[in-house]
Image (cartoon, grey):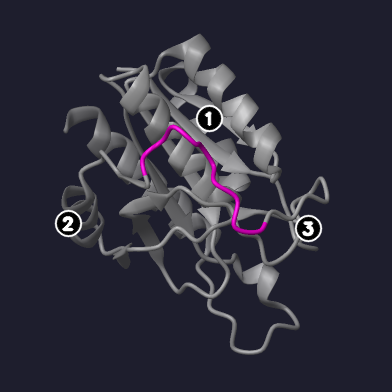
Amino acid sequence: MKILVTGFEAFNGEQINPSEEIIKALAETFGEELYTLKLPVEFREAEKKLVEAIARLTPDITLSLGQAAGRECITIERVAINVDDAKYPDNFGYQPEDITICEEGATAYFTTLPLRGILACLAENGIEARISNTAGTYVCNHVMYQALHLASTGYPDMKAGFIHVPYMKEQTEGKENAPYMELSEMIRAAEIIIRYLKVS
């Protein structure tokens, strides 16, 4: 089984992105059993790199990871919507407002990953997680939408989905009451999810 896991570079003034650190750790843990890809926090370039990677690898599963400030635990996204609407510019300076991602695409796509199974597997291992019903309208949602659109239109055997992770502890300095999760715990959660997906 071929699994592609993507993460993002730092953005919005941050010096680090936990999703990038997680995919680095996954690459070390799983080696050639897993494909990882760091995406830029740029709407157009992230889409381009994702499309290229999926075309090259034809993975059975594409799992994307991203940072969600303000969330307290691992959140498994249920749905991606067909709109880009950014509160702040991406790393290229692009700030879309009410822009349709794909004119010929569906209004929304639901994840094709086993939400409840992932949730139960994490709970069995003592990791707090929940299902989220909004991936936002920033680059994370854009990437999730594009992966599912590709699956729907050209890669019918590929499953795809998105998981948001909280801040790392180091990112909360100067941010009063900002929730976080230890990176080691997020890495452990990602490893558990990958192992679960390999057999589910």
Mark 3 and mark 1: Cα distance apart in space: 21 Å
Q: On the rendered image, what quadrant is the N terminus found in?
A: top left
Whether tag 2 and tag 1 are in contact, CB under 8 A, the answer is no
Image spot of residue 2 (x, y percent): 36, 18
Residue beneath the point at 58% across and 52% down: 84
Horizontally, residue 162 falls left or right of residue 180, namely: left
- Considering the numbered disc 2 on the image, is that residue within a helix, a strand or a loop? helix
From the image, tell me which residue sits under label 2. Answer: 120
Image spot of residue 8 (x, y percent): 63, 44
From the image, tell me which residue sits under label 3. Answer: 15
Image spot of residue 151 (x, y percent): 35, 26
Neighbour class for label 3 at 10 Å: few (<14), some, many (≥20)? few
**Stretch of the chain drawn in magenta:** 97-106
- Considering the numbered disc 3 on the image, is that residue within a helix, a strand or a loop? loop
Question: Secondary structure of the magenta portion, mostly?
Answer: loop
Label whose residue precedes the other's in the sequence (2 or 3):
3
Does the magenta segment cover residue 157? no
Looking at the image, is mark 3 or mark 1 nearer the viewer? 3
Residue type, numbered disc 3? Gln
From the image, tell me which residue sits under label 1. Answer: 27
